[in-house]
Structure formats: structure tokens, C-alpha cells
Image (tube, helix red, strand yellow):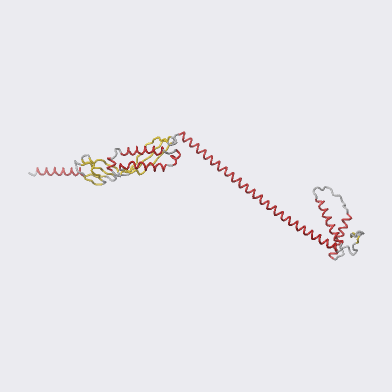
Amino acid sequence: MFQGPAVFVLIVLAVVVFYLLRAIRMVPQGYNYTVERFGKYIRTLPSGLGLIVPFIDKIGAKMNMMEQVIPVPSQEVITRDNAMVTVDGVAFYQVLDAARATYEISNLQNAIINMTMTNVRTVMGSMELDALLSQRDEINHRLLSVVDKATEPWGVKMTRIEIKDINPPRDLVDSMARQMKAEREKRANILEAEGFRQAAILKAEGEKQAVVLQAEGRREAAFRDAEARERSAEAEAKATEMVSTAISAGNIQAINYFVANNYIKALEALAKSPNQKVLMMPLDATSMLGSIGGIAAIAREAFGGDGDGGQGSRKTASGVPSVPPRS
């Protein structure tokens, strides 16, 4: 009697459980599921627990919403200066709209790869080789701007595009190495020549300074010599004036002193002459002795002494004092 209803209840419970299992969908973190009803997109299930209508709705696509990386295959690119290089890289992207990434483009990753490779040829083909090797940041920025704009209708955000390797041909690499070596040698020669130039300038400046200092020294010496000669001339003039005054006063001994002094100086100059080899003596010894005697007489008169021991000096007929005879 109760066997029929019990079986019915069990069947109903089984149907409900099966229905719930078909209606409940667990969406993992980082994923979005698209829901299709009779083959048409109706909504997107976010991460977590989601419900659909069994037998009517179904899961269309399970889209990864995390940032993903795809390698860009290597390809040959001809630069603007007709140099052929081999280039590869990587691209980073993130799906922002699961529905558009599913239904606006077929095979999203393949489309991104081909779009990136095409724009690599476009961007790098418009640059010269030197700029290509030295301006990778600019290349990456231009590629990212172009590819991101192209993939925007697909609900995709391009986050980064990086060029990994740029490989010129071997002969071109060797030529660049020779060019770099020649440039370095050129800079080394320039630096060496600049060093020699600076050394020559410093040497010339030193020689100039030395000449200037020598000229200043000679000028100072000449000035001092002139000053010494001026003072000597002044002294000579004063002595001459004093002798002239003594002569005018009738002092004949002053004349004897003046003549004897000049006579002795002349003999001294004659003896010191570099061309003088032989000096014949005596040279008018009588006159010399007479002059010396005049000098002695002047000294005795100046000091008031009696230098001849009380005998006194005697004058010759010419008025020149004579030397007393020795005992």
C-alpha cells in the first residue's frame, strides 16, 4: 500500500538532486564562464557559485581572466637601411570582457600573436639598425600602443610587449665590431693628441714665464747696475769737486793724490786685462813712488802725525815730495 508513494518520492528526490546538480556551477577564482541559452549568449558567471537553468542553459566558454603571457615567435625584419635582423619577444595581456573575448574573435591567442608579429615588422622596419639596437624602450612603447588599440574590440588589455633578442647577421656583427674598434682607437688618438697639445701648451707657458722672469731679472739687475754707476759717478764727481776745491785753494798734494789714485787704477786694470800676457816693470817707478809719497804726506797732514820719525818730507824741484833715504 505504501510501496507506490515511497517509490514516487524517491524518484522526485532523485530528479530534484539531479536538477540541482545541473543548475549549480562552481566558477574558480580568476575565471569567468559564459552562459548560452539555446546557443545564444545571455550572461557571464563570475567567480564563485552560479546557477543556470538545466537543459536550457549551458556553459559556453571558460575564460581565464588573469594576466597571461604568450611568446612571440622569431621572424626576420628588414630595417629602413636594408639590414636584415632576426627578432623575437613576449606579449602580456589580460582579458577584461569574457563575452567579447569569446564571441568577437576566434582563437584569441593566435590572433594576438599574429597582430604583434605584424606590428613588429611595421615598427622596426621604419627604423635604422643603429636606432633599432639602441632604442628598445621606444620600440616596446610603440608596439604596445598599436597592438593594444587593435585588440581593444576583443575585450583584451595588452599590458606589456617586450622585444627579447635582436640578432643581426654575422657579417654585420663583425662589421659593427670593426667600426666600434675603429671608433675607440679614434677616440684614444684624439685623447692622446689632446694630451700632447696640453703638454706643449703648458711647456710653452712655462718657457714664456721663465723668459718673462729672466727679463724682469735682467731689468732689475740693469736698474741696480745703473743705480750703482750713478752713485759711483756721483762719488767720482764729488771727489773731483773736492780735488778741484783743494787745487783752487793752492793745495798741490790733492793733485798728487788724484793723479796717483788714477795711476794705480790704470795699472790694476792693465794687470787684470784678459789679453795682457806680459807686463814690463818698472813703469816710471820714480813717478809712482813720488805719487805714493804724496799720498803719505796727505795722510800725515790729515792725522797730524809725523810718519817719518821727525825727519819730515822733502820736496823735489818739481814740488813732489820725495821719499827720505833709508839708513
Q: Residue furthest bottom?
A: 304
Q: Work out whether residue 73 or residue 153 is closer to the camera in this orientation and state it.
A: 153
Percent coordinates x, y for residue 171 in the rendering: 47, 33
Percent coordinates x, y for residue 6 in the rendering: 11, 44
Count the marks.
Answer: 0
* Above or below, comparing residue 302 to residue 67 in the picture: below
Horizontally, residue 9 falls left or right of residue 136, namely left
Quarter holding residue 61: top left
Quarter holding residue 140: top left
* Above or below, comparing residue 238 to residue 194 in the picture: below
Horizontally, residue 147 falls left or right of residue 8, namely right
Horizontally, residue 85 falls left or right of residue 249, namely left
Percent coordinates x, y for residue 271 in the rendering: 82, 51
Quarter holding residue 137: top left
Q: Work out whether residue 241 or residue 186 is closer to the camera in this orientation and state it.
A: 241
Q: Residue furthest top?
A: 171
The quarter of the rendered structure image containing the N terminus is: top left
The quarter of the rendered structure image containing the C terminus is: bottom right
Q: Work out whether residue 281 or residue 218 is closer to the camera in this orientation and state it.
A: 218
Q: Residue furthest left?
A: 1
Q: Work out whether residue 17 or residue 299 is closer to the camera in this orientation and state it.
A: 299
Percent coordinates x, y for residue 139 in the rendering: 40, 41
